[in-house]
Image (tube, rainbow, N blue to C red):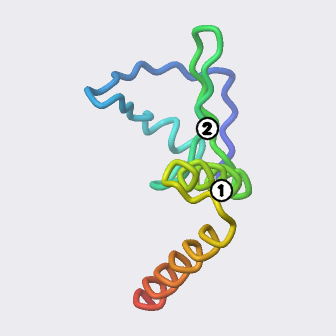
Amino acid sequence: MKIVKQEKLHEVVKVSERGQVTIPSSIRKIEDLRKGELLEVVYRDGTILMTKLDKRGNLELALKLLGKGLAAAGYQEKDDILRFSGEVRKKVHEEWTEER
């Protein structure tokens, strides 16, 4: 990966009707952002900050989001959550082995 030293890069982006923004290609190249990577979005005092998460950060955030999603879907008991995660793991494994 080529390391680019820049003090500041200023770009203007437009928010779409669905609230989406496109990160300029110059920034995606510098940060080596790829499709599917997670960014943490923080709002503080009128400033919106996006930070690329490392793989560990991706996993931690994904697990937090999964926990919130499971609770919202009514999975409260440990046995229910374990049964659901087993089903998901089986589906993912099947898809993964089909792709190989």
- Looking at the image, which residue is at 44% across and 35% down? 23
| Vertical order, 70 against 9 (above or below) | below
Q: Which mark is residue 40?
A: 2
- Judge the density around disc 1: few (<14), some (14-19), many (≥20) Cα neighbours within 10 Å: few
Q: Which residue is mark 1?
A: 63
> How far from the left and from the top, in percent, is residue 58?
65, 53
Of residue 27 and residue 49, the one placed in the foreground of this image is 49
Query: Marks 1 and 2, Cα distance to the nearest angstrom?
Result: 14 Å
Q: Residue furthest left?
A: 17
Q: Please, what is the three-letter code of the amino acid marked with disc 2?
A: Glu
- Looking at the image, which residue is at 60% across and 20% down? 43
| Vertical order, 34 against 25 (above or below) | below
- Looking at the image, which residue is at 69% across and 45% down? 3
| Vertical order, 59 against 2 (above or below) | below
How many marks overall? 2
For residue 40, what is the image quadrant?
top right
